[in-house]
Amino acid sequence: MDIVNPALDDYLLDHANPAADDVLRDLAAETRQALPEQRSMQISQDEGAFLTLLVRLTGARQAVEVGTFTGYSAICIARGLPDDGRLIACDVSEEWTSVARRYWARAGLTDRIDLRIAPAADTLRALPREETIDFAFIDADKVGYPVYYEELITRLRPGGVIVLDNVLRGGRVVDPAAQEPADIAIREINDIVTADERADSVLLPMRDGVTVIRKR
Ligand SMILES: C[S@@+](CC[C@H](N)C(=O)[O-])C[C@H]1O[C@@H](n2cnc3c(N)ncnc32)[C@H](O)[C@@H]1O
């Protein structure tokens, strides 16, 4: 699904700031080359700049990412944190996150990112039940989104932000024939977030759909 035409898309990418530097460009190139079938899982450079901006706007120190892959979004989030900020990055793949670790080292971010290899629901449930998280990004298995959202919003401080990726599922959210478990889960989380009296939110037509949620 193309929300904007290719020329406008190039224009959007050219007008994201911070632009992708050598580390992000090389990471995107290595992911494209080594993992051609999975490469579309990586966020785009404008979405990366958007994450960095949101982390800075939130004044976040404690961040959580659900779905790390080869580490692109983690770099964008970690770069928005102060020197003493921390990002807990959740994934189940040693293989994909071994690429991430190399690029985090190159970006000088190793000390800022705490990678937890386990099902994200387990990692999140093990976090203290206190409102200490400032920023969270959810970009993993879609059927897990309702659980990830609930575990994170209860631990988010008032004014904290959660970002959900792929909330349009390539347009499948409005296709009645799309009934895969991931389609059902994404429609469910979109409805949960919209009705949630604990938060304000907006679903943006950026890439595959990005929802920004602020806890009241
Ligand atoms: C869309 S990719 C994440 C892309 C990443 N945000 C980036 O910018 O490159 C989804 C990731 O979620 C991970 N994942 C899938 N199921 C998971 C689970 N139950 N718990 C934690 N991570 C999971 C996959 O291993 C994969 O790396």
Image (cartoon, rainbow, N blue to C red):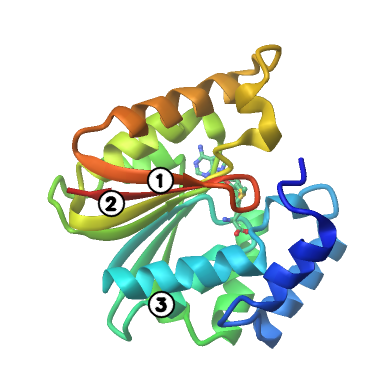
Instruction: Say which amino acid is labelled 2.
Output: Arg
Of badges 1 and 3, nearer the viewer stands: 1
- Disc 1 on helix, strand or loop? strand
> Residue placed at 65% from the left, 69% from the top?
45
Image quarter of the N terminus: top right
Give the number of the mark in front: 2 or 3.
2
Q: Tell me how far mark 2 sits from mark 3, CA to CA.
A: 17 Å
| Residue 168: mark | none
Q: In the image, which disc is placed on residue 80?
A: 3
Residue 27: quarter of image: bottom right
Proximity of marks 2 and 3: CB atoms separated by less than 8 Å: no
Q: Three-letter amino acid code at disc 3?
A: Gly
Judge by depth and name the residue closer to the eye, 91 or 207. Answer: 207
172 and 136: which is toward the camera = 172
Which mark is first along the chain, 3 or 1?
3
Q: Quadrant of residue 126?
A: top left
Residue 130, percent across and down? 12, 50
Q: Which mark is residue 214?
A: 2
| Secondary structure type for disc 3 | helix
> Mark 1 belongs to which amino acid?
Val
The answer to whether residue 204 is above or below residue 151 is below
Residue 92 screen position, x and y as percent: 54, 46
Q: Is mark 1 within 8 Å of ligand 1?
A: no
Q: Is residue 143 above or below residue 202?
A: above
Please tell me how crowded label 1 is: few (under 14), some (14-19), or many (20+) other residues with Cα within 10 Å: few
- Is the residue 153 above or below the residue 46 in the image? above
Numbered circle sitting on residue 202:
1
Task: Residue 193 in the image: state x and y as whole percent.
Answer: 35, 34
Total labels drawn: 3
Could you tell me if residue 16 is visible in this image?
A: yes
Q: CA distance from mark 1 to mark 3?
A: 21 Å
